[in-house]
Amino acid sequence: MASDEKNVDTVDLSETPKYELKLVDRTLKTNEDQITDKIEEKMIVTYKYYEIALNNEKVDAVDTLEDAEEIVNEIKENNKEELNLSIIEKYTQNEEELQTNDIEVAKTEIQDKITEVIEKQKEQERIDSMPEVNGIKLATKPVSGTITSRYGVSSNIRRSTHTGLDIATKTGTPIQVVADGTVTCASYQGSYGNLVKVKHSSGVETWYGHTSKMYVKVGQEVKAGDTIAAVGSTGNSTGPHLHFEIRINGKHVNPQKYLYN
């Protein structure tokens, strides 16, 4: 057989050869290759190999059960995480489906896949743990600093109670947008000074006031974590800080219910 015999499990004949006796010229030479070729035309070869799956999804395949077990045992010993690795015995009569790797290549392929899966799981856990506003995930704080004025407090520098949260930090500190959205304002707005507004979905909007610089324009699409402005003290301000607001359907809410709590 021309096929790789190490993976052959069974060989059957689709049709039993028919034999008959004939008188032939003794000087006539028998062509054994022709006979073998005729028999091989009727052969049905079944190949066996072993898939290694992670979370029931095939990652690689090897020739023998011993190779598969060695790979699974070694990988489990070298990984602290609980891994759902399984070995699946496979059969095929299509030689093109018989694609196996040697043990070292398979180990590398499977470990790379495990690393990828673990990173995705961690990222999903991070996303799941994010605070939400009306279903919108807040991926990051806009800045780190000291809270100097909380939501709802009164002050002699403003006419009404505080509509946001003031976070003091040095001038020029990058301000990050907390979620994906579209910039709806990037201009000087009275007591807010240089103000950036970002519209998110589900009626959520975030405001970033008193900035020293604005790096975005109206209509610009931004992704969570993008730097949109720099901390400053423009407008009605007593020092460098970020005035941060969250609004739902136009109404301001306490940012500390979601961030800085």
Image (tube, grey):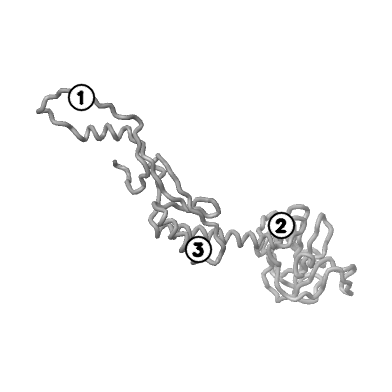
| Distance in Å between CA atoms under marks 3 and 1 | 62 Å
- Percent coordinates x, y for residue 84 in the rendering: 55, 57
Residue type beneath disc 1: Leu
| Distance in Å between CA atoms under marks 2 and 1 | 92 Å
Q: Which residue is mark 2?
A: 183
236 up-or-down from 27: above or below? below
Mark 2 and mark 3 lie on one chain; the one further toward the N terminus is: 3
Near mark 2 (Cα within 10 A), the count class, few <14, some 14-19 or many ≥20, is many
Mark 2 and mark 1 lie on one chain; the one further toward the N terminus is: 1
Q: Secondary structure at mark 1?
A: loop
Most foreground residue, 5 or 114: 5
Q: Which residue is mark 1?
A: 21
Q: Residue at x 75, y 70 (%)?
A: 260
Near mark 3 (Cα within 10 A), the count class, few <14, some 14-19 or many ≥20, is some
Residue 89 relative to residue 23: left or right: right
Residue type beneath disc 2: Val
Q: Residue at x 36, y 41 (%)?
A: 10
Residue 7 relative to residue 193: left or right: left
Residue type beneath disc 3: Lys
Q: Secondary structure at mark 2?
A: strand
95 up-or-down from 177: above or below? above
Q: Which residue is mark 3?
A: 76
